[in-house]
Amino acid sequence: MRYKKPKAFPDNFLWAAATSAYQFEGAYLEDGKTMSIVDANINENYTNTSITSDHYHRFKEDIKLMKELGMKAYRFSISWSRVLPNGRGEVNEKGINFYKELVKELKDNDIEPLATIYHFDLPLCLQEEYGGWSSREVIDDFVYYCEVLFKNLGEDIKYWFTINEQSNMFLLPYLMVFNSEIPLEKQKYEMNHIMMVAHAKAIKLFREMVPSGKIGPAIGISPNYPKSCKPEDIQAAKEADDFRTYLFTDLYVHGCYRENVWRYMEENNIEPTIEDGDMESIVAAKPDFLGINYYQSRVVEYAPEDIENRDVILNTDGKSGTTSFEVNPGLYKGDSNPFLEKTEWDWEVDPIGLRVVLNELNDRYHLPIIITENGIGGIENLTEENKVNDEYRINYLKSHLKQCNLAINDGVNLFGYCPWSFMDLLSTTSGFRKRYGFVYVNRTDKDLKDLKRYKKDSFYWYKEVIETNGQSVIENSEKV
Ligand code: BGP
């Protein structure tokens, strides 16, 4: 449904943009920082995390651009191994000072800092010492890391995100390190539980140390559509949502495991070990809001028990048609959606899906929501006049923002929007080949060039969106 008289975006709406430390900062072994698991994960086709966009050395120049863009807020992540080079223990003064200076510079420019505590980058030393997220030892180390952050930055940062895309970490093997001797599915659910306890304990500490702050998770979310109106497919789509989304969000908000997912884990001997006090910690850690990362929707159909199991194979090179979808015997298997346009990376462009998930989360959890990521990646080059014509990005973001506005009109308490990404940075899957930013960074995977920043066409478009508090997008909402 559309509205004849759509409401505007709220007055204090947080118009923002996002990045993450390992994808944006570079300086991966500088000023005391040590390696993280993502720094160690090298893909020979692409550049590594050593320099990326060199934000570490250029943050003041970058914040000037944020100011020029009119950003009201900026979502970034903090690198655990920059702050605590040994994963715990002594604080690296140069590391924590970098974030203090960054936050000061943002605030001096009237930009609200939105900090993510963990964005895929566990200190490598903790992985080597005890197996990282597979060991409960990580819980205390994570909570100590949070304590250092809340003590040093709690007064200046109001909005915090505990963990980025917990659900996706278990789907994408390069974001977690798995032990080949333990059955993969068992490990995934054990690690997920350990991470959930760590998240919950971080929130408990936050309530004590930063009572006036707000905290929540940043969830990677895609709605699952049934491939047909066959009742088996409808049920399969519901189960795909349960396993891929509501398992996590129910734990975050209601503090309990979904019955059907728990029964599935038990019947397959893959249920996590729950220790005394775990569920009490989890249930006590209700977040203030939900952050959601939304890029695309998915289609699933029922998958019989005897079908061959398969994890998703991603198209990481931008060669369309090479994605192979997830198969989960007895549950669901993915397929492409014939009604949607796809990017070169086979990501299915579905603005309406965003309205669907916003409403679904609002109906279930009645919490404020912020979009912590939303965007489109593609191959781009500078023109002879040093411009980047990224009309496709403008179209993508515009169509998604229209759906955000419709969701607000539906009653969703949406309080901010962080397109991914503020500036070109290292893609999680595809290096510098896949660009996302409003600002072009002059480098490629193989050639560092001068790392100069150039404003793309989308920069000027988003600037107008912010200046008009989104009105420039709503005016045309009937064309959606
Ligand atoms: C999300 C991550 C981001 C970012 C984005 C785009 O899952 O939180 O870190 O990378 O996806 O993904 P990609 O870079 O693989 O295109």
Image: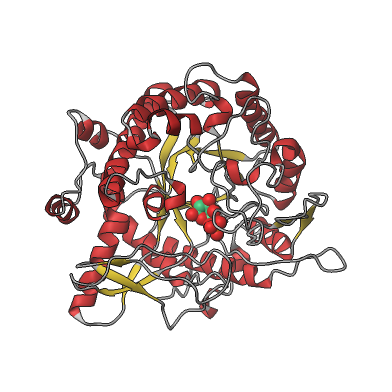
**In the depicted structure, whether residue 140 falls above or below residue 161:** above
Q: Front-most of 203 and 25? A: 25
- Residue at 54%, 71% in the rendered image: 399
Q: Quadrant of the N terminus?
A: bottom left
Please, which residue is most extreme toward the top here?
90
Which colour assignment does the render follow? secondary structure
**Residue 306 drawn at (x, y percent):** 19, 71
Locate residue 453 relative to residue 238 in the image: left or right: right
**Residue 463 drawn at (x, y percent):** 69, 57
**Residue 307 drawn at (x, y percent):** 23, 72
- Residue at 55%, 41% in the rendered image: 40
Please, which residue is most extreme toward the right here?
385
**Residue 379 drawn at (x, y percent):** 67, 67
- Residue at 28%, 54% in the rendered image: 246
Please, which residue is most extreme toward the front here?
181
Q: Front-most of 421 and 351? A: 421
- Residue at 63%, 62% in the rendered image: 434
Locate residue 272 relative to residue 15 in the image: left or right: left
- Quarter-wise, where is residue 361 in the image? bottom left
- Quarter-wise, where is residue 227 in the image? bottom left
Locate residue 308 relative to residue 474 in the image: left or right: left
On the question of residue 123 being in view, the answer is: no
**In the depicted structure, whether residue 109 falls above or below residue 65:** above
On the question of residue 232 being in view, the answer is: yes
How many marks are shown on the rendered structure?
A: 0
